Amino acid sequence: MKAEHRKRTIVGRMLLALVVLGSGAAPALAQPTNYTTSDKKAIKLYESGGECLRQRKWSCAETDLKRAAALDPRFIEPRIYLAEMYEERGLSGQAMDYYGQVVAISPRYFTPAALHLAELEFTAGRYDDAEKHYRLSLDVDGDPVRKQRAEHGLASCVFAREALAHPVPFDPHGLGPNVNTKAPEYYPCVTADDSTLMFTRLVEDARSPYGKQEDFFVSHKGADGQWGPSQPIPSVDTENNEGAGTLTPDGRFIVFTKCAGVDGSYGDGLRGLGSCDLFISRRLGDRWTKPENLGAPVNSRHWESQPSMGSDGRTLYYVRGQQAANGLKSMDIWVAHLQDDGTFSKPEMLGPTINTPFQEESVQIHPDGRTLYFSSDGHPGMGGLDIFVSRKQPDGSWGTPQNLGYPINTSGDENSVVVGANGKLAYMASDRPGGQGELDLYGFELPVAARATPVSYIRGTVTDINTGAPVEADVELYDLADGTLATAAYSDPRTGAFLVCLPSGRDYALNAGAEGYLFFSRNYSIAQDIGTTPYQLDVKLSPITTGSTIALRNIFFATASYALLPASNAELMKLAGLLRTNATLRIEVGGHTDNVGNDAANQKLSEQRANAVRDFLIAQGIDGGRVTVKGYGETKPSATNDTEEGRALNRRTEITVL
């Protein structure tokens, strides 16, 4: 789960493993008659060094292989063993030295050597040397997998040199001792109001057979802007690994990764489908519910992790790891959609614009629903995992990923990035010097080119208009331009509180509804230069009783006309759904105008507009006998007619329960 601590195994780097496991090696190395030396003492030392490797006796292997190499400066075999041994042990300098000797003696004898050398040089920031040896690899090595790696390496060399010459602004600040500790902290996520931070911490735990395991911690931002003491989530955290989670923008749902223990159990009576599955927990007041497995088809026999839930509450991005044909674990980004029946659609892997034959992970869909952040070592970068941003195109496809640049990205692994709702502030995990311990959490401002669309939010409560009691309601925001659901949330059944995101640059219809109530209607036009101040809204729902009335604020007509505009469709379909759900409900559709113009003309227009709504409902299969109409003209203003804002409120359609 924790990518920063994993060890990668790459095709073509396995000569040492083959030797150690006794599986043989290249034919040239296996046949004594084909050794590149005739010095018998050197051969004997080489063979004894190989035996030490098989027994994992690194000291004697190193001694004998070095002595064998010293006896003949053109004896390639011990140099290959030494290069592989040093590479596997993380001793990059020594590995580069011996790979360099192999390539200098004969680049075609052991063709993977040039690629190994180039990748080590690239990681060390020696881009000119790396480019030379990537090109050499392409000349001498016909293996298609290694060719693909060499071509990718060449592209990364070009990018890295350009990125170093043009660094982006980057000024990270630690989140403080209430969040960062001596233990590793990583995979942060924040609510849309930037008030709650959740992250994963690797903690000491005697219950775990490993002595350590991953748990969630939560911190809340104080009035001084500092993060407060972090606390675990008792009902979610167990002795097994839980981590790499995502909060919905309102902070009321966690979707997270939970992995099986050594005995294959998920603990606490929970079951799984693979080694790691995605689970969900819901917050009721201050209490979190027992986690539930999301089940198939989101989870599979493979490895699912690192989820990110869209602000619409219906779109789930995550990483699936599965064994590839070449023996490596392939990690790609997938997406699934919550359907109207409460189940998830069959997941789809994002296309080749995002996913590569290499590794993709640490995905975040920003609350704007159109900006995707992720880590990858398969796109041109600085080395290791780099952070990228891609933007959804008008046709629904994803644009070419853009590297966030240096020094945000370095030759090491960068991931665990999450971008706040304002599109500017980001959080990431890093083991840079000056921290509290290993991996710590940092905040920083993104370069302008990497920012997401700013997102504000509506915060409020849903209550019964008569009793004032909190109501659990669906709160939905529709894009008036195309009628699609932009974002959704549930109000807390214990407090009535809710929060929904508002991406900028669009007009929205807000509906809030609950069983047994008429729905609530409001509209919002969000300017492009959106501020961070949230909208406050108290939603008072009217029970479905005789005489209850609601104003439909998202029914729109052409000026001085009764022609319904397409932006009305979302609200009209909501009204049709209310009538279908409540089969005995009869309503009056009332049309109202402002006082501009002739009284008689306004009266007639109000009647025509009420009839237009009735006709729409009938076209949706609603019995016309259940819908009566009445035009009130300008006789019942709900606001002053002395201002444009007041006149706009008076031009309305109302529904009254009969």
Image (cartoon, rainbow, N blue to C red):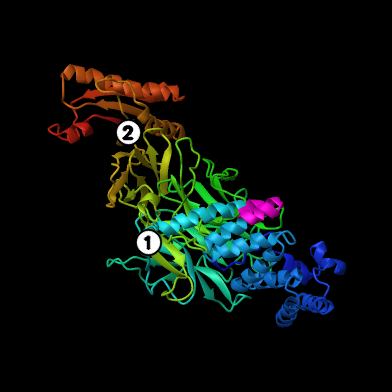
| Residue position for label 2 | 554
Residue 88 screen position, x and y as percent:
66, 70
Bounds of the magenta segment: 135-150
Query: Is residue 534 highlighted in magenta?
Result: no
Amino acid bearing label 2 = Asn
Query: Mark 2 or mark 1, which is nearer to you?
Result: 1
Q: Main secondary structure of the magenta part?
A: helix
Dot 2 crowding, Cα within 10 Å, few <14, some 14–19, many 20+: many
Residue that appears at 59% across and 49% down = 356
In the visual, does 508 lie left or right of 248?
Answer: left
C-beta proximity under 8 Å, tags 2 and 1: no
User: In the drawing, what numbered circle is on residue 655?
Assistant: none
Q: Is residue 47 visible?
A: yes
* Frontmost residue, 641 versus 539: 641
Tell me the distance, in whole angstroms, between the alpha carbons under discs 2 and 1.
44 Å
* Frontmost residue, 253 versus 375: 375
* Residue occupying the far left of the picture: 642
Q: Earlier in the sequence, mark 2 or mark 1?
A: 1
| Residue position for label 1 | 170
Q: Quadrant of the C terminus?
A: top left
Above or below, 136 against 593 in this view is below
Residue 621 screen position, x and y as percent:
46, 24
Amino acid bearing label 1 = Phe
Residue that appears at 58% across and 79% down = 206
